[in-house]
Image (tube, grey):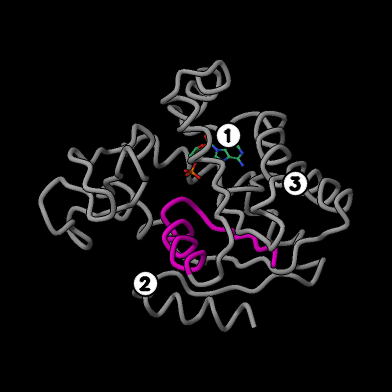
Amino acid sequence: MILIFLGPPGSGKGTQAKRLIKEMSIPQLSTGDMLRAGIAAGTELGMKAKAFMDKGDLVPDSVVIGLIQERIGASDCKPGFILDGFPRTIPQAEALDRMLSGLGRSVDRVVEFKIDDQELVSRLSGRRTCPKCSAMYHVVTQKPAKDGVCDQCGTQGLIQRTDDQPKVIQDRLAVYHKQTAPLVGFYTQQKKLRSINALDAPEKVTDALKKALK
Ligand code: AMP
């Protein structure tokens, strides 16, 4: 099954994708994680992407399309995959359709995570991330068992991503509404879109997600 999780930053796409990949045994393809890995490794692509990411802007389409193109041909993607954070523009969605059709495949379902901006600002500004495995926490609502230590991989020193700073959050939300929200119409036209309420507790969102995928 090829799935797209579509929603603003902080809507819980990544958290839900992590839950679902365990059950479905398919990989999660997060362009944000791929780009951050490039930055951490100091690659040329990572350095180019960093300037855009730090400002909350989108990285150029050609860069992320190239990353996805390379990744979806890998053998672990044969049973399907969850796209988390891609596509984010209409040209990316069109490129994805072309890439998949070249492989004799197509997107099965797109799930829109619906949530208002006010909640997103509070979620993102309190978010802390594991620099190693990208597990996510929140300073109030989802603390790790041991202060500052990742429950998943034991890494010490959870970080606040540069793009989770208040000023950048506003810019990322504006970018979402302008450049990514039009994908709702794109996938509605393809009759692939289902919307879920992403404001609920994570367990409830998982239930809604599973229903949306049936
Ligand atoms: P995320 O972890 O998905 O919130 O992505 C973090 C940042 O990476 C975004 O704010 C963008 O700067 C960049 N990024 C991730 N995915 C894409 C994409 N599909 N298109 C353009 N930029 C992206």
Q: Quadrant of residue 184?
A: bottom right
Rendered image: mark on residue 58: 1
Q: What residue did someone put label 2 on? A: 202
Q: Which residues are magenta?
A: 1-22
- In the rendered structure, which disc, 1 or 3, sits on the residue that comes first in sequence? 1
Marks 1 and 3 close (CB-CB < 8 Å): no
The CA span between labels 2 and 1 is 27 Å
Q: What residue did someone put label 3 on? A: 90
Mark 2 lies on a secondary structure that is helix
Q: Position of residue 68 (x, y in %)?
A: 68, 41
- Along the viewing direction, whichever of 177 and 80 lies nearer the viewer: 80
- Along the viewing direction, whichever of 68 and 4 lies nearer the viewer: 68
- Along the viewing direction, whichever of 69 and 136 lies nearer the viewer: 69
Q: Position of residue 54 (x, y in %)?
A: 43, 27
Determine the residue positioned at 75% across, 46% down: 90
Determine the residue positioned at 41% across, 54% down: 10
Locate residue 19 relative to residue 180 in the image: left or right: left
